[in-house]
Image (spheres, rainbow, N blue to C red):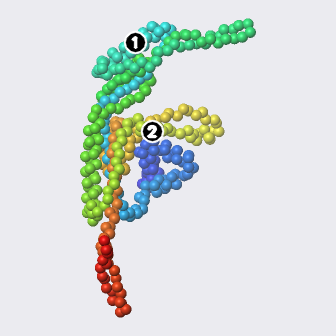
């Protein structure tokens, strides 16, 4: 009996391990299999090889590279919704739009949204045409005539906490506003964030310089060159998608019947910048999507060229040399008449 349980656990363990990794990882492996037409063992082996450290090659030019990342929770957000209203007349169209917006306002104000944080942006107000067919004795004409009006607006709603967005979305949906255009993230004092990054990057740089000094390298005997950069990425730049299931049906194959494919639901998830290439990450544990601001600095130290000893050259002017038969050299001054 123990042997049977052991065999059962042996077969079920890989399945449990795969499930912990998540659907997105599983699907990404399936996509690789489809594109490269390889078996699982070949794919896993290839992935392991990619993780191996490359061989180090000594270089007379020393490079010190420091990367620091900061995960910032936004101070405020702005959600933008698009809504369209049509009517037979311009007055009717305006009144219908005004009623919808007023209902949304009353619901949002009741939930704590301030009036100054609710802005309407009018996009377009145009007539809508329809084609009328006019048949004549020897021809047919198609004429466009105004049949109504279309008013399009954007609603901008500012909020300060992520949990408020669910209530905003619900208030818009209750008034037939479903088109969420985007959500913008804002930081009140972005300069203070970069200032903190510079402080942290100097700390790491100082530690790395000390490491080379401890190894016996005198950095004062090198010529330094520098390059640096900074960047800011918002959550909308890092959303990825995947499909969480496939269409394989063993039962349909056995019955030799056709398979009607269902529409696959596309899922999206937030995949921020990985921490593996960074020397320091501030606010590492994140739950909600954040603004990721980073700074990098690279220093290269080239050996200073060795100084060449200067050779003193004696220049003899107005002198001549006399060589005797015995090989003796006599230097005499040459007097020139002015």
How far apart in space, not on screen, are marks 1 and 2 (Cα)?
37 Å
Asked whether residue 173 appears in the rendered view, the answer is no
User: Within 10 Å of the Cα at label 2, are there few (<14), some (14-19), or many (20+) other Cα atoms?
Assistant: few
Q: Which residue does the image show at 43% across and 27% down from the upper left?
A: 181
Secondary structure at badge 1 equals: helix
On the image, the x and y values in percent for residue 273 come to 38, 43
Residue 107 in the image: above or below residue 182: above
Residue 171 in the image: above or below residue 232: above
Outermost residue to the right: 138
Q: Nearer the viewer, residue 122 or 270?
A: 122
Residue 215 in the image: above or below residue 40: below
Q: Quadrant of the C terminus?
A: bottom left
Asked whether residue 151 appears in the rendered view, the answer is yes
Secondary structure at badge 2 equals: strand
Q: Which residue does the image show at 26% across and 42% down from the upper left?
A: 195
Tell me the residue that label 2 is attached to. Answer: 240
Tell me the residue that label 1 is attached to. Answer: 98
On the image, the x and y values in percent for residue 60 come to 36, 63
On the image, the x and y values in percent for residue 194 come to 29, 41
| 238 lies left or right of 66 | right
Point out which mark residue 231 bears: none
User: Within 10 Å of the Cα at label 1, are there few (<14), some (14-19), or many (20+) other Cα atoms?
Assistant: few
Q: Nearer the viewer, residue 81 or 6?
A: 81
Task: Name which quarter of the figure residue 50 lies in.
Answer: bottom left
Q: Nearer the viewer, residue 86 or 225?
A: 225
Task: Name which quarter of the figure residue 146 lies in.
Answer: top right
């Amino acid at each position: 009996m123990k042997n049977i349980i052991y065999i059962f656990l042996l077969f079920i363990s890989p399945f449990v391990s795969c499930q912990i990794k998540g659907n997105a990882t599983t699907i990404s492996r399936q996509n690789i299999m489809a594109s490269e037409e390889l078996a699982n063992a070949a794919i896993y082996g290839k992935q392991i090889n990619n993780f191996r450290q490359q061989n180090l090659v000594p270089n007379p030019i020393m490079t010190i590279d420091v990367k620091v990342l900061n995960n910032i929770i936004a101070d405020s957000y702005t959600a933008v919704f698009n809504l369209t209203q049509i009517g037979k007349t311009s007055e009717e169209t305006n009144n219908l739009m005004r009623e919808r917006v007023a209902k949304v306002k009353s619901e949002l104000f009741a939930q704590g949204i301030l009036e100054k944080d609710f802005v309407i942006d009018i996009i377009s107000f145009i007539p809508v045409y329809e084609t009328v067919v006019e048949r004549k004795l020897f021809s047919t004409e198609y004429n466009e005539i105004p049949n109504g009006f279309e008013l399009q607006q954007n609603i901008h709603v500012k909020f300060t906490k992520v949990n408020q967005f669910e209530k905003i979305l619900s208030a818009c949906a209750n008034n037939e506003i479903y088109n969420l255009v985007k959500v913008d993230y804002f930081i009140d004092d972005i300069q203070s964030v970069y200032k903190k990054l510079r402080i942290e990057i100097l700390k790491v740089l100082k530690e790395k310089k000390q490491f080379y000094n401890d190894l016996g390298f005198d950095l004062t005997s090198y010529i330094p060159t520098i390059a640096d950069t900074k960047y800011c990425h918002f959550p909308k730049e890092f959303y990825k998608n995947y499909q969480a299931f496939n269409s394989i049906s063993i039962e349909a194959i056995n019955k030799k019947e056709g398979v009607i494919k269902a529409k696959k639901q596309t899922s999206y998830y937030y995949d921020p910048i990985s921490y593996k290439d960074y020397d320091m990450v501030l606010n590492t544990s994140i739950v909600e999507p954040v603004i990721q601001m980073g700074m990098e600095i690279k220093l290269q130290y080239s050996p200073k060229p060795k100084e060449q000893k200067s050779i003193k050259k004696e220049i003899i002017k107005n002198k001549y040399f006399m060589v005797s038969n015995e090989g003796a050299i006599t230097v005499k001054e040459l007097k020139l008449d002015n």
